[in-house]
Image (spheres, rainbow, N blue to C red):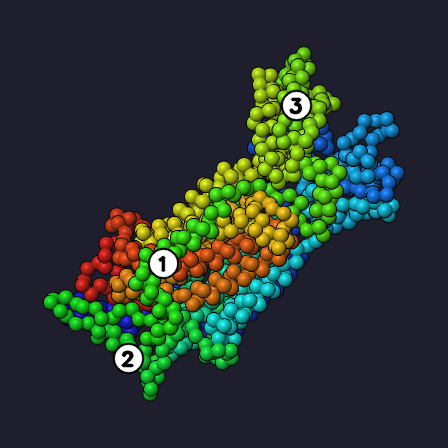
Amino acid sequence: MTSQSGTEVKDPGSRIRAGRLRRLGEWCARHFITVIVLWLIALGGLQGLNGAFGGTYSDNFSLPGTQSDDGARVLGRHVPGAGGIGAQVVLYDARRPLTGVRSRIDQAVGSLRTLPHVLSVTSPLPSAPNAPPTGALTPDGRTGYIGVQFDANPTSFGGSYLRGVDAAVEPLRAAGVQVEYGGLLGELARPVPADLTSEAIGFAVAVIVLLIGFGSVIGAGIPLVTALVGVIVGVSCLGLIAAATTFASVSPTLATMIGLGVGIDYALFLITRHRQRLMDGADPVAAAGLAVSTSGRAVIVSGCTVIVALAGLYVSQVSFIGKLGVAAAVTVVTAVAGAITLVPALLGLAGRRIDRYWVRRPVAEGEPAPAPNGVKRGERTKREGRTKREGRTARAGRTTRTDRPEPAGGEAHDGWHRYARRVERRPWWFLFAGLVAVGVLAIPLFSIRLGHIDDGADPTSFTDRRAYDLIAAGFGPGANGPFILVVDQSAVPAAERPALASRLGRALTDVPDAASISPLRPTTDGQLLTGTVIPSGSPQSAGTTTLFHHLKGDVLPGAVSGTGATTYVTGTTAAMEDFLDLITARLPLIIGVVVALAFLIILFVFRGLLVALKAAVLNLLSIAASYGVVVAVFQWGWGGPSLGVSGTVPIESYVPMMMFAIVFGLSMDYEVFLLARVQESWLRTHESRGSVALGLEITARVISCAALIMVSVFAAFILSDNIVVKMLGLGLAVSVLIDATIVRLLLVPAVMTLLGRSAWWLPRWLDRILPRLDREGEEATPYRRSVSGGRPGAGVQGPPQ
């Protein structure tokens, strides 16, 4: 048909091009039995393969090229057994000195030496009554520790290895000596994390939210089923990948956390679109196909954005960090696959019975207005279509538009509609309120201190925490994280080595933040000088970090300057400090890469320069606010003890990096779904303010419910005994809450309204070189050109022809 001005207008009721996604959705809905059976086979098969061949998880990682790693290698070459990974078997006897059970200690030391992977074992007792003390026994003789050096991280040995350690120290326990495992050996002895409680709580809250938000029992169950299936399949795949490479122990928990959140969200967005089509009178199979070709496309874009953000972690050049991103990305992939295949299959199975069981009157994307008396919903939809097509009049040689965006499903002016119009009328007020809220929450970020959380923050039910407390009480808190000094004097002439040792001795006198520094002694081959530094504070204290940098950068290099000697500060705590320095130096690069990639994805999909820039900037603001909350809770101690954290702790060095990649990716979910609806209306009407209000009105209910579900899933993991998991759980929960409320309901609509038509501006040269990605709805949503016959604003793309 043509308008009176002669400009061709596409009929909204014209034939819709059936694309691949739509055909996929319809096929899955029509052949639901086949799809469900295939998923069940994958579920059972991968679970079985994972049980038979799956790998284990451990925090076994190295930092090649760092001075602590180089120092450990140098020490290992000259002192066999000294260059491995150390752990402690801590002994305490309240009744008598440990010398009273010398025979039992000697027996335990001998048994430990016979275990696999053990390089050396040192007893806390002197070799003879008149021999000098070893430094591993307190003056009262009641507390001591057996030092064990392993050839690899003991957390990678598995639970069966621990039974051998238990058998070796059993004579001491039989004699009434308290035996605890410290360091990495203690981490191996930690109980297996029971995250099923967290998952159950997250599921329970999700059920309640879905039932209250949408009313339908079956509609609430489908997202939960598909998310659970996707997570189980994804974690099973991760276990099989772990058989070939090492993943951190937190990896399956992180994968489960992310997989549940995005799995429920993705399924929810498809189901709400499908059910709206059913309410409009569409056939169930066709409705499922349309849902996959519209919201399913947004799911794919969102999933790709999350995966790209997680892949950005490899910019850190630390495999430990990059693999955490891979672990989370695996369940994101299975969540997307489940959303575009299993969800339409279950929708085909449910058919029109999806709303048969309900706890309140079911609703979908918007609150549909009741059809006029005597008019069926399908007939009403057709009449509205004809009214809109005919709602144009020629005036003064041009066309005047009368099809202002309408609320979803009809004329109903519910709460979200009124709110959307209020934002449209007063955008500056909403922008100001959102910026103030984000700014206040972000204040603690300016005092953030990255570090490594030591065993002193763990629950007292952990053996490594009890070992930590025994060592801190007997030797001081710094004894839990000593530094090993290594001076390679192989390039120094023999005649000059005494003078070098004297210079080092003077330099290591009265070093700030050091409780004690042992004299540097030569190794048996005379090529190295080694000693031990006990910090004044705990391993996670700021003073220990200051001491490390002072020793590494000032004291040792200054003492050997001009001699040809090389110095190292090594040990477990030194490796953690090097890891912290590495992460801190590369965090800005990771942020820049992830922001740039996400900016490009939004630009490709929505083809609006300011839209993409706005998305990047506002997401940065929401992440800053979530960082501030994490700092206030854990570093400032505002509520940390109530979460099971002993005292205040620094922010684990890699948590901000992980949070940034995950949050930036997840926040794009809501950005894509909101912008897709705004652009859909904009391309149809070219009214910027009304399109923003309509997009907010349609998506507000779904985004709010989806965000509340994701918040509950993440927040449930605060119950974990792992401090890092607690930190990630709180940080992700808060960030999603901020993003879905302050950012998505205040800042985004306010900024989009203020930008108006310029939001979709794109320079012509950039328009020509950008690849064209099919955005949500281009296969299923009818379009028409601007009725004035020209481009709808510079750089704004007309519909495909």
539 vs 163: above or below? above
Residue in the foreground of this view, choosing between 187 and 755: 755
Crowd around label 3: few <14 · some 14–19 · many ≥20 (10 Å): few
- Mark 2 or mark 3, which is nearer to you? 3
Q: Which residue is mark 3?
A: 509
Q: As drawn, which residue projects farthest toward the bottom?
A: 374
In the image, is 511 to the left or to the right of 23?
Answer: right
User: How far apart, in angstroms, are the residues tagged by discs 2 and 1?
Assistant: 37 Å
Q: Which residue is mark 2?
A: 383
Three-letter amino acid code of the residue under disc 3 = Thr
The residue positioned 47% from the left and 64% from the top of the image is 706
Residue 382 at x, y percent in the picture:
30, 78
Which mark is drawn over residue 690?
none
Q: Which residue is mark 1?
A: 430
In the image, is 313 to the left or to the right of 684?
Answer: right
Contact? badges 2 and 3 (CB < 8 Å): no
Three-letter amino acid code of the residue under disc 2 = Arg
Contact? badges 3 and 1 (CB < 8 Å): no
Three-letter amino acid code of the residue under disc 1 = Phe
Crowd around label 1: few <14 · some 14–19 · many ≥20 (10 Å): many
In the image, is 439 to the left or to the right of 146?
Answer: left
Residue 488 at x, y percent in the picture:
64, 23
Q: Quadrant of the C terminus?
A: bottom left
Residue 767 at x, y percent in the picture:
28, 51
Q: As drawn, which residue projects farthest toward the top?
A: 495
177 vs 702: above or below? above
